[in-house]
Amino acid sequence: MEAEAAKLIGAGLASIPLAGAGVGLGLIFGNFLSGAFRNPSAAAQNQPTMLLAFALTEFTGLLGFAIAMIILYTF
Amino acid sequence: MAGLNFIIDRMLTPYAAGPMEQFEILPIVRLDFAGVDISLTNSSVWMLIGTGAIILFFAMATRRAGLIPGRAQSTAEVLYEFVSDLVRDTIGTEGRKFFPYVFTLFLWILISNLFGLIPSLPGTPAEAHTFTPTSHLIVTLALAMTTIMIVIIYGFWKNGLKFFKLFAPSGVPLWLMPILVPVEVISFLSRPLSLAIRLFANMFAGHVILKLFAGFVVSLLAADGAIKLFGIAPFLGAIAVTALEFLVAALQAYVFAVLTCIYLSDAAHASDH
């Protein structure tokens, strides 16, 4: 296989983690909302935890994106 | 129209070559110390500007500190109390001595992250473009290693060899230990890497996406006729990404500070459980 084609396929494969990050973010916000609707008074104090989880989950997708960019631009 | 064409021309020529050029480190003042390149680069200049801005802001805000705070003093107090509460909630009263470190870390990462969102004027030389120091892995790795070094040194200083209890939580059956201990050790060793890569990847990816959208606008404006009008779509996208990046910049500084506090709390309370 040509190196250029392999590079492009690799970059495409490296963006698969975005699917997992999408599922994860949906779970976090969805569960937070369903919890917040059941007990609105407890929603505000759990917001920092939710944002922390958001940042931790987003990282998985971004790692894939960073790897794709590194494959595309530095090799 | 001529003015617009000039700007497009200027943006298409050497400056907007790709989304990765923004991360290039360019020397501003060339310095050489015993064969080692210690040039003053755009990265170090923006770090110095960030540090200077923080010192200047807090010096101005607390210069005439009053019982009824002004606007600057309120901002400073909100920032102080935010990090102070964070440290107290995560580490406990023992955490007071780490407050200066966490506060410095939080402010410095926050301002470094926000610098990259200041747009550069078209046509300025590449050395004068705004730069995000935290978009380089070596910078975030240095910050993460500092945190982990403090955790290790403080952990051994406070707990002695009982610090190793961190890898063997109490209440776990003995037959589980051979599996649990290696996992705990690996998770401890991967902490500096995950801290560093999280901040780096967030800043790096966000800025690449922002510049990709900006690049689409430029290439659509350079097209013929009515196709120019489609440039509005990536332009709106770039605005949305900028808004998201403001959230991410603040959130990542917060996450870095929270995780630093959690790790320090581990070191402070390793022999408790």
Image (spheres, rainbow, N blue to C red):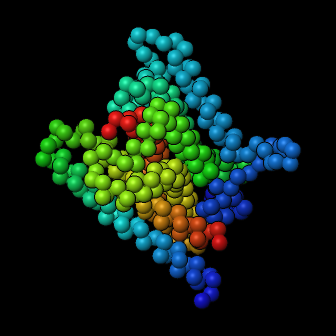
Q: Give the answer, above or below, for where B21 lies relative to A48.
A: below
Residue lying farthest left?
A38
Image coords of residue A72 (percent x, y): 59, 71
Identify the residue at image location x=16%, y=37%: A41
* Side of B124 relative to B104 (left or right): right
Q: Give the answer, above or below, for where B198 lies relative to B154.
A: below
* Viewer-side residue, B125 vs B42: B42
* Side of B120 relative to B268 (left or right): right
Q: How many marks?
A: 0
Identify the residue at image location x=76%, y=42%: B40
Residue lying farthest bottom?
A1
Q: Is residue B137 visible?
A: yes
Name the quadrant of the N terminus of chain B: bottom right
* Side of A6 relative to B263 (left or right): right
Q: Is residue B232 visible?
A: no
Question: Toward which corner of the image does residue B51 lie, by quadrant?
Answer: top right
Name the quadrant of the C terminus of chain B: top left
Identify the residue at image location x=74%, y=51%: B26
Image coords of residue A16 (percent x, y): 42, 72
* Viewer-side residue, B90 vs A64: B90
Identify the residue at image location x=67%, y=48%: B129
Question: Toward which corner of the image does residue B218 lie, by quadrant?
Answer: bottom right
Image coords of residue B185 (percent x, y): 45, 53
Image coords of residue B250 (percent x, y): 45, 42
Residue lying farthest front?
B174
